Amino acid sequence: MSALMEVRDLSVGFADARGIFLPADHVNLTIEANQTVGLLGESGCGKSVTLRSLMRMVPYPGEIVGGSLMWNGRDLCTLDRRALTAIRGREISMIFQDPAACLNPVFTVGNQMTETLRVKAGLDRAAARERAIELLSHVGIASARERLSLYPHELSGGMRQRVMIAMAIATRPGLLLADEPTTALDVTIQDQILTLLAELKDETGMAMILVSHDVGVVAQNCDVIAVMYAGQIMESGPASAVVRRPRHPYTRALLAAVPGLDAGRGRAPLNAIPGQPPNLASLPPGCPFQPRCGFRTEACASIAVTLDAALPAHGSACPVVN
Ligand SMILES: Nc1ncnc2c1ncn2[C@@H]1O[C@H](COP(=O)(O)OP(=O)(O)O)[C@@H](O)[C@H]1O
Ligand SMILES: [Mg+2]
């Protein structure tokens, strides 16, 4: 059986004042139905750009410069705009860190939901309204009918994220792309939202890619983890293996920066790794992590960053530490 989505050697290029750089550099990922894949890495490593590229929504002036995105037997990279629009927001949906920024402040929740449902699900106004109520109840919003007349600012951050999730799942997508969906929320609300996402996932069989800089969030909510550094996947594998037996020095450093991960949720910011975060426009030759790596050898300047095993196996891109 083939995977839900196969990402093969996907690269995204940007050119700005810093020079030319690749926030996604030969990314390989396999996403199976009903699976949660965590994309983990420090801020600026390319997670958001990579995630958006999976729907071919790379922010201007970036563009996909290589690779393929197989979805239901079709390569999204070569699909025409019309076919792509039919998939975006329907078969593949996305939610973001800041739900306030995605909701229009001058329209009520009801207006926005019915409009989305009319466009995406082809319902008439009355049916869209009923479906909106159903969806809001489904994501745990009480008195859903009354909430339709509220404006986004009248809802809490957690409620707004529930509204965004309700809209994202309206068309029963096969894949939900979640970009730091709980980073803006406080800890107890974060847990509620992650639990809701897990429940929806199991109920509908959809798969999810959960992007986070938070090791604890990824460790506790994902089946598979891919660790990204400077636009490249350094390690990927089953979550339990990556967390218990991290192979790549970067993954080890990330995990070491989180105290008591096994005991509870680690929430330390990932600033405990010595050295400077990489400048994507001027990476060293070979492994981009070498300037910060405790295991660095002379060979590191000439290695190719390539995983030694593809998903679902546990692969590392470090040939020095094994
Ligand atoms: N619209 C853009 N124009 C130029 N550079 C961008 C743009 N969007 C993102 N980048 C750059 O791409 C790199 C990766 O960014 P991003 O994917 O947002 O990282 P992350 O989500 O891991 O924090 C960063 O160096 C960022 O500055
Ligand atoms: Mg981001």
Image: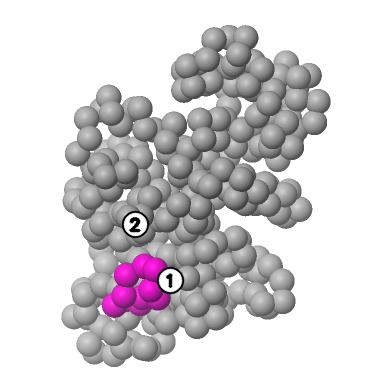
Magenta span of residues: 308-317
Q: Nearer the viewer, residue 220 or 102?
A: 220
Q: Secondary structure at mark 2?
A: loop
Q: Is residue 13 left or right of residue 171?
A: left
Q: Secondary structure at mark 1?
A: strand
Q: Is residue 312 above or below residue 316?
A: above
Residue 225 image position (x, y, % from top left)? 47, 66
Circle 1 is placed at which residue position? Answer: 237
Q: Name which residue lies at 64% across and 15% down.
A: 129
Q: Name which residue lies at 68% across and 26% down.
A: 134
Label 2 environment density (alpha carbons within 10 Å; few <14, some 14–19, many ≥20): few
Magenta stretch prevailing secondary structure: loop
Circle 2 is placed at which residue position? Answer: 1
The magenta stretch spans residue 102? no
Q: Nearer the viewer, residue 99 or 139?
A: 139
Name the quarter where the C terminus is drawn.
bottom left
Q: Is residue 188 left or right of residue 27?
A: right
Task: Name which quarter of the figure residue 311 lies in.
Answer: bottom left
Return the disc, 1 or 2, that comes first in the chain's sequence: 2
Q: Name which residue lies at 31% across and 88% down.
A: 320
Q: Nearer the viewer, residue 271 or 117?
A: 117
The amino acid sitting under disc 1 is Gly
Residue 38 image position (x, y, % from top left)? 49, 60
Q: Is residue 18 above or below residue 311?
A: above
